[in-house]
Image: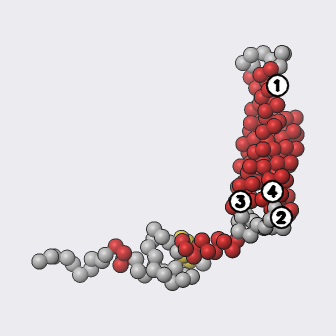
Amino acid sequence: MTTESPNTLDPEEEYLGLRCNRCNKPITPAEAVLTPTGYRCRDCLRQQQKVFDNTQGLDVVVGFVISMLIALAGSWLSARISYLVILLAPGVGLLIYNAVRLAVKRRRSRALSIAILAGAIAGALPVLALTLYYVFTSPAAVPFSSLNFLPLIWQAAYAVIVPSSAYLQSKGGR
């Protein structure tokens, strides 16, 4: 004879009261995703996400090219403004996001966000590489001088801040 109490429920039966607010399928807390309108199952969430991913044709290419060109222009400018890069780089990331968003008529997708990130990285790297080359090959450079490495530090900061800012803006825009 088992001595189970009548109040003991099977773990799956315990959560039968939680249901997807779209398809009304019973879900466990591990499967539930909280949305602004209530809990949904992962299947309904995937179907809903497909509606929001609406890029067309060359939107990803346009996003990459625009983000690369703006990041390249900003990278060239950041080589001349030193420590102000820390203040201006997030603004360049926001400019990239808004320019791409305007060019693709507010369409969005995960692929577009990744293209914006890749374009911003590609735009930031050439000037960083030139600065790196200059720092290590300049005949007037004093080895291990902190002043010699400052342009490299600001370029590296730009190369990190701008792509991350642009990507986070685009990811938040979905």
Select label 3 or label 1 by which is in front.
3
Instruction: State how far apart marks 2 and 1 are (Cα).
Output: 38 Å
Indicate the secondary structure of the residue bearing disc 4. helix
Of pointers 4 and 1, the one earlier in the residue sequence? 4
Of pointers 3 and 1, the one earlier in the residue sequence? 3
Hey, what amino acid is under mark 4?
Answer: Val
Task: Residue at 45%, 71% (x, y): give it.
Answer: 29
Circle on res. 61: 4
Indicate the secondary structure of the residue bearing disc 1. helix
Circle on res. 104: 2
Task: Residue at 41%, 80% (x, y): give it.
Answer: 16
Hey, what amino acid is under mark 2?
Answer: Val
Instruction: State how far apart marks 4 and 1 are (Cα).
Output: 32 Å
Of pointers 4 and 2, the one earlier in the residue sequence? 4
Q: Please state, as top left, top right, bottom left or bottom right, where the N terminus lies in the image.
A: bottom left
Label 1 environment density (alpha carbons within 10 Å; few <14, some 14–19, many ≥20): some
Q: Tell me if label 4 and label 1 are in contact, CB under 8 Å.
A: no
Instruction: State how far apart marks 3 and 2 are (Cα).
Output: 13 Å
Hey, what amino acid is under mark 3?
Answer: Ala
Residue at numbered disc 1:
134
Label 3 environment density (alpha carbons within 10 Å; few <14, some 14–19, many ≥20): some
Of pointers 3 and 4, the one earlier in the residue sequence? 4
Instruction: State how far apart marks 3 and 4 are (Cα).
Output: 10 Å
Residue 16 in sight: yes
Which of 117 and 143 lies nearest the eye of the viewer? Answer: 117
Residue 35 in sight: no
Residue at numbered disc 3:
111
Task: Residue at 54%, 71% (x, y): give it.
Answer: 42
Residue 167, percent from left and from top: 72, 54
36 left or right, relative to 57 = left
